[in-house]
Image: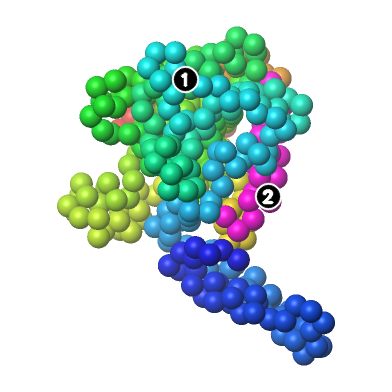
Amino acid sequence: MTDSPLSFEQPIYDLEVRLEEMPKNNPSPEIREEIQRLKLGLSDLKKKIYSNLTRWQVVEVSRHPKRPQTADYLDLVFDEFVELHGDRFFGDDRALITGWAKLDGIKVMVVGHQKGHTVNDRMACNFGCAHPEGYRKAVGKMKLAAKFGLPVVCFIDTPGAYPGIASEERGVAEAIAEAMFEMSILPTPIVCVVIGEGGSGGALGIGVGDKVAMLQYAYYSVISPEGCSGILWKSEKFKDKAAEALKFTSSDLLKLGVIDKVIEEPLGGAHRDPRMMASRLKQYLRTQIRSLSRVPIEKLLDARYRRFRDYGVFFDNEEAAAAAFQRGSLFPASGTKEPLAQE
């Protein structure tokens, strides 16, 4: 049972409380039958609620205070982890964790946003909003991984990069742009997973990979729904309307081709069963890393380039779209780097 129910989870929470209050020691046949009935009802209720979430409710789930974060997955997914600190230029940004890890004996470099669970941790991690030094640290560690021929795993979970004056003075936009550029040409496999919030350039700064996946109840967007609402409607009151317009959930982005895979979460969200979620995430990472490691680096980099160039491409007619689908690429058959049509 979670002690932090979301607004739409109250019926689930009430039923869980009833289950907790049922006698545990030597219950009568009638009580055992009632417990079984409540458990079935709870499972059905979770399925009903979570299969009909609005896009704003998905955002709520992605921000749940008990939702597993990068540090949690480091304990649950990987066998070992040795953290690496600092960007060798300004300082160490705790909003981004970097370090060596082992995944079933496979050595990898892990880079991930960290929000923190307690108030003190959240303040130390700046609520997952990284400064420029965080992205420079991430790039430096990724290059180190490439030097030793080891894959990179990125966990994305941020409302966005920190937009304060100090961050701007130290060049946050340039740091994110450089990170994206370096990732696009990094000669080693990269797997990115949006585990919670994927907000703006702060997310894309460690999001250029060969494979990009999302957990089922995560979101990945150019802007947060509150930010969109503030710009378009001059108020945060319309954040649910903005969320619907942005179409940033995992199912939306899978249809649009922005991501490659939706990793299913346990019933009721990852915060209800972090170990099961970690098991599914581990299986995905293991499969992708082994698959990508067999691809020659030249082909890997070319496919990575084309993958991101395909974003935003559309077709003027069904015949062109069908031909591109048959080729497995949205580029002209001539092999040029220019897309068929752009808005």
**Which residue reaches farthest top?**
147
Residue at image x 36%, y 20%?
A: 175
State the image coordinates of residue 166 (x, y, percent, origin top left): 26, 27
Amino acid marked by disc 2: Arg
Whether residue 287 is in magenta: the answer is yes
For label 1, count other residues whose C-alpha is less than 10 Å away and answer few (under 14), some (14-19) or many (20+).
some
* Residue identified by numbered label 1: 86
Amino acid marked by disc 1: Gly
State the image coordinates of residue 311 (x, y, percent, origin top left): 42, 32
State the image coordinates of residue 30 (x, y, percent, origin top left): 77, 90
State the image coordinates of residue 200 (x, y, percent, origin top left): 36, 37
Closer to the camera in the image, 164 or 269: 164
Q: Is residue 66 left or right of residue 219?
A: right
Span highlighted in magenta in the image: 271-293
Mark 2: secondary structure? helix
Residue at image x 52%, y 30%?
A: 97
Overall secondary structure of the magenta stretch?
Answer: helix
